[in-house]
Image (cartoon, grey):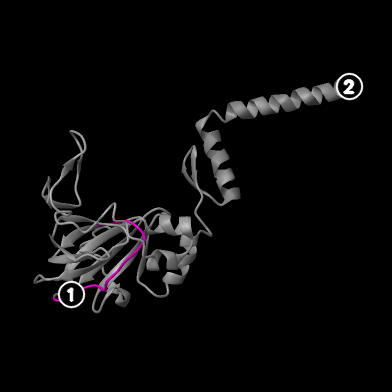
Amino acid sequence: MKKLLFVLSIGAAGLIVAGLIALQTGFARWAFFEIFAYVKGSEVLSPTVLREPPEDSPYERWLLTAKSAIPVFEGLVIDDIGEVTLRPWPQMGEGVNGLYLRLADYQIIDGRLLEIPVGSQTLEQRQFFEKAIYIIEGSGYTLIQQEGEEPQRVEWSAGTLISIPINVRHRHVNSGLEPARMLIVSSFPFVLNAIDNEAFIEENDFVFDDRYDGREGYFEGQEPVNTLIRKSNRVDCDGNNFAGR
């Protein structure tokens, strides 16, 4: 009996060693990860990387409800943000068309494509998250107002990139002769997942005056960080050249 147990132990150890050796081969690693991913319900990105789609985060729950109220795009790629068809988005303003962008199951950042008709504007917004806005086409201005301060008018045209200070009132106005289309990238998913309270994000009245105090010149000029990096709250892109204003 002892001899039999010894033989079985040796055999089991041999199988383990053989399995570990087999995992060093590309095919064995691929097969192992495919089986593991199938059991876990994950997606294989490479022979050593798995991605497990989120299922029940605060942002996922918000998105599930939002799909019935706003135009949503979900996918990996938009071939041309200047040509993609937009749909009415009345919550953004009268006549405003757009798409809420949820790309690749992201839980950190999201996007919004908006198109404002000539002579129109978005509704005023104020949210507890960061925003960056890139103007795809058209011209106009954004009114930005910190609590207790006069609103600042920030002009923009195709190629302008603007950083909206956190939790300030703002609205976008199309003063040009053609529809104005813009891409907005924000940290809304990250903040919602961290706080799990949409009302706190939309109705928070805290003033971040250490970041933006409404002073003149906030959206003008550049501040050098080092020889390669400059800090600015508004940038104009002309071809391959960027000029902070």
Looking at the image, can residue 208 be seen?
A: yes
Identify the residue shown where x is 43% and y is 54%: 107
Is residue 83 visible in the rendered image? The answer is: no
Q: Specify the principal SS of the magenta part.
A: loop
Residue 146 placement: quadrant: bottom left
Q: In terms of sequence position, does the residue under pointer 2 or pointer 1 come before the other? A: 2
Mark 2 closeness class: few <14, some 14–19, many ≥20 residues within 10 Å: few
List the residue tagged with mark 2: 2
Q: Is residue 186 left or right of residue 160?
A: right
Q: In front here: 35 or 58?
A: 58
Q: Position of residue 109 (x, y in %)?
A: 37, 55
217 lies above or below 115 = above
Q: Which residue is mark 1?
A: 117
Q: Report whether 204 appears left or right of 137.
A: right
- Viewer-proximal residue among 69 and 25: 69
Magenta residues (range): 119-132
Question: What is the CA distance from the residue labelled 2 to the residue labelled 1?
Answer: 87 Å
Taking 138 as reference, is 225 left or right?
Answer: right
Q: Residue 154 location in percent, x, y?
A: 15, 61
Q: Amino acid at mark 2?
A: Lys
Residue 105: horizontal and vertical position, in percent? 43, 55
Residue under the point 55% across and 34% down = 28
Image location of residue 195, percent across then percent down: 47, 58
The mark lying in front, picked from 2 and 1, is 1
Compared with 235, 183 (above or below) is below
The vertical placement of 219 against 36, above or below, is: below
